[in-house]
Amino acid sequence: MYCNEDMAIDEFDFSAGVLGNICTPYIDTISKAACARLNVTELWEYLAKYSDYFGVMLLIAGAMLTFIGRKLLKPAICCAGFLTTILVTCFIYYAVYLEDTSQLAEFWYFLGGGALAGIFVGLALSYSIKIGAAVLAGWGGLTGGLILYESILFRADA
């Protein structure tokens, strides 16, 4: 699909013939629906550029939580609350505020606001250990499920 900003959202155009070969045919289409709504490649480029550093940092944090986790329960709960708040604000942005006229600055404001709110939520959860432990356990279940799916269950989809 190719982007054409001048077309209506429900309007499209396509090539007259089928391209490709007999095993993988395709048709070129042109529509406004193919245009990018929000481009956050700066964020993904940053994460990809420093992925080795993030990986080492997370491995060290995981090893520390494995061996001295009871003493690091409050910082772990604070981090889980921080990440949960950012995730929720991004879901709200994508579900409610993302329109075809959205600007990139709006996304960064939402992400920054989510990070700022995440600091306060993380600190509040670290003082209420039972609720914070439930959030932390939710993250543990999520990561355990992702590991299980990526290592075994993805083959069952075929």
Image (spheres, grey):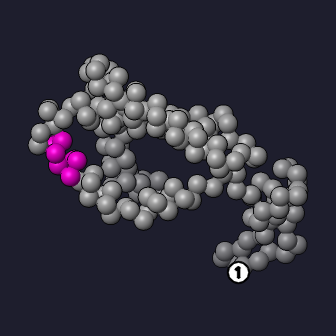
Tell me which amino acid carries mark 1: Asn
65 is within the stretch colored magenta: yes
Residue 55 picture quarter: bottom left
Give 9 or 47, whichever is nearer the viewer: 47
Residue 20 sits above or below residue 126 on the image:
below
Q: How many dots with numbers?
A: 1
Is the N terminus in the top left, top right, bottom left or bottom right quadrant?
Answer: bottom right
Q: Please, which residue is most extreme toward the left here?
A: 67
Give 148 or 113, whichever is nearer the viewer: 113
Tag 1, which secondary structure? Answer: loop
Q: Which residues are magenta?
A: 60-66
77 is within the stretch colored magenta: no
* Residue 26 shown left or right of residue 47 in the figure: right
Residue at position x 14%, y 32% from top?
A: 70
Instruction: Kindly tell me whether residue 85 is visible in this rendering.
Output: no
Residue at position x 66%, y 76% from top?
A: 23
Residue 155 sits above or below residue 87 on the image:
below
Q: Residues within 10 Å of mark 1 (few under 14, many from 20)?
A: few
Residue 30 picture quarter: bottom right
Q: Position of residue 56 (x, y in %)?
A: 26, 58
Residue 102 sits above or below residue 33 on the image:
above
Label 1, on which residue? Answer: 21
Q: Position of residue 17 (x, y in %)?
A: 85, 75
Instruction: Kindly tell me whether residue 28 is visible in this rendering.
Output: yes
* Residue 49 shown left or right of residue 112 in the figure: left
Residue at position x 71%, y 45% from top?
A: 102
Q: Please, which residue is most extreme toward the bottom here?
A: 21
Q: Position of residue 61 (x, y in %)?
A: 22, 47
Predominant secondary structure, magenta span = helix
Q: Position of residue 22 (x, y in %)?
A: 70, 78
Residue at position x 39%, y 32% from top?
A: 119
